[in-house]
Amino acid sequence: MTHDLVIRGGTVVDGTGAPRRIADVAIDGETITAVGVVPGKGRTEIDASGHIVTPGWVDIHTHYDGQVSWDPYLSPSCWHGVTTVVMGNCGVGFAPVKPHFRDRLINIMEGVEDIPGTALTEGITWEWETYPEYLDALAKKSYAMDVCSQVPHAAIRTYVMGEKGGDNEAASAEEIAAMSTLVGEALDAGAFGFTTSRITAHRTSDGKVVPGTQVSIDEMEGFGDALSKAGHGVFEVVSDINFDGIPGSLTDKEEIDWMSDLSRRKKVKFTYLLFQNPGNTDKWRSTIDMTSSAQAAGAELYPQVSMRPTGIIMGLQSSFHMFMGRPTYDALADLPFEEQVEKMKQPDIRAAIISEKSDKLPFEGTALRYDMMFRLEQADGTLDYEPSLESSVQEFAKRAGVSEEAILYDMMMENDGNGYIYVILVNYGDYNLNFVHELMDNPTVISAGSDAGAHCGAICDAAMPTFMLSHWTRDRKAGPTVSIEKVVERQTRATARLYDLNDRGVLAPGMKADINVIDYEKINSSRPKMVPDLPAGGKRLLQTATGYRATIVSGVVTFENGIATGALPGKLLRSAPNAFTPAAALAIA
């Protein structure tokens, strides 16, 4: 028998958590047809000896809602072995929208997710008003991976309530019913869920809280009704859960209670983002305990946890850094970058900038912690995402007997002004990731939070899937590592199942042929680089990867050794009850 493609002699890590084994993988059309000894030849063959063969990564927390208009590759995820993305997270997105509120939705996305408004304005094609029309527009396009979309609260609220919705005024019963109807229409058209932002830290670009923040549980009930009637979809919540004393926010118990109550009564699946509280580093344990109790009582409630610290990368070309707003720096800020760096090397300019203060920087004087700032790139060229307290800017300054700002300045000036500081905000209260290691053993905790497509000027966590494999299974020094089998399962089968994508995430006959062939010893992320490749010349931090020998989507090789083949077999997926449950998936389950 001849197959379309045979991956020959690789170490198969199949996504179920089962022990790795040497096997061939045969593919015909979009489907895996054999895993084991494959005697038949392939029209195309990949020699995977010495490599691991895994399912393609399924990244469920992305923000490509605008980028899908202009970028068929959905970079940077395409460079990191991702074969399916879920977007529309955190309650923000671009449908439904009335024409005169397009700028409002851009303003929200720019503020919450740090995507340049100019890029969104120029790049989004606006071929839609309603959410079903948005999906129809995306369905006409081809991509390097499959795309799933969720309907966002901010857009729904703005569409129904106009200015009142944006100002977070209470919705009437009639308005809640109208919003519920729209969400139902979106789910019937193929949305994979509904998302809401209840976290007060999310702000629009003009400083307002996002539409939907701290609204009534009655409003949440209306969205639960829509999901219940549709019979599919996930309710994603980003809130102030696990933080303390946020004015106007519910307590942790109240947040868990309304989600679990609604889940049980209406048979709705929930997922919420869980962060480690930097001021109360073990508080997550009580949140997990409450979640476990809710699960035991019949609620479907799944915490999402980022597998590395949540923070920003601060450099001279980032969206913001410590020296913005200081008069001497601001006088140089509009110069060509190379000229700016040459001037900043001058001792008198260095001294002036370090001595001045800023009235612009959002976190100066509030949550400024030099013990949570670290040089990202080490002397050997590696990137340290789990640094020790001893390597912090605070400790460097103590040892050198100089100010922390002097250390920051000099670190940022490294590599001709391309030095980066890793500024950690949450998920690092103990100066290690041991709490994440512990949570990996909880099967209901989902590994997510890459925010791929967002935070263009300060974060590049789209590289998270590559980090998961390289750091957690091979490079970690601050604590125990994790098996390759577990890490692969965490970002394939586990993430796919949350969104009922039961046709992928496992290497088995009958499953979708989304596959990575990986040179395990070489798998790594590159150092961040600021690139002006967005519409309107917008800049973003990008990280590519090494070690991906091949990425395959629907049986078609899309990337070889990090280079695009030009094939675009990916497409918009539309959710529906049991839409992605082939017989093979039922057998595996």
Image: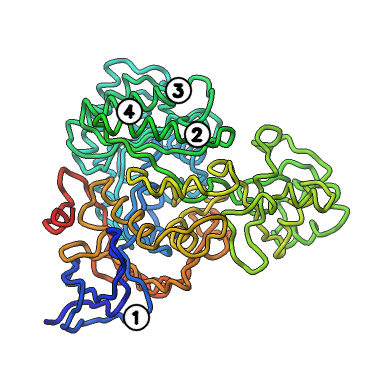
In primary-sequence order, the first of circles 1 and 2 is 1
Q: Amino acid at mark 4?
A: Met
- Looking at the picture, tell me which residue is in the foreground, 192 or 94: 192
Q: Quadrant of residue 279?
A: top right
Q: Residue 78: x, y in percent?
A: 40, 62
Q: Amino acid at mark 2?
A: His
Q: CA distance from mark 2 to mark 3?
A: 18 Å
Q: CA distance from mark 1 to mark 2?
A: 47 Å
Dot 3 falls on a residue whose secondary structure is loop
- Which mark's residue is nearer the viewer, 1 or 2? 1
Of all residues, the one furthest to the front in this rendering is 480
Q: Are marks 2 and 3 in contact (CB under 8 Å)?
A: no
Q: Residues within 10 Å of mark 3 (few under 14, many from 20)?
A: some
Residue, disc 3: 251
Residue, disc 1: 49
Q: CA distance from mark 4 to mark 2?
A: 20 Å
Q: Amino acid at mark 1?
A: Ser
Count of numbered circles in the view: 4
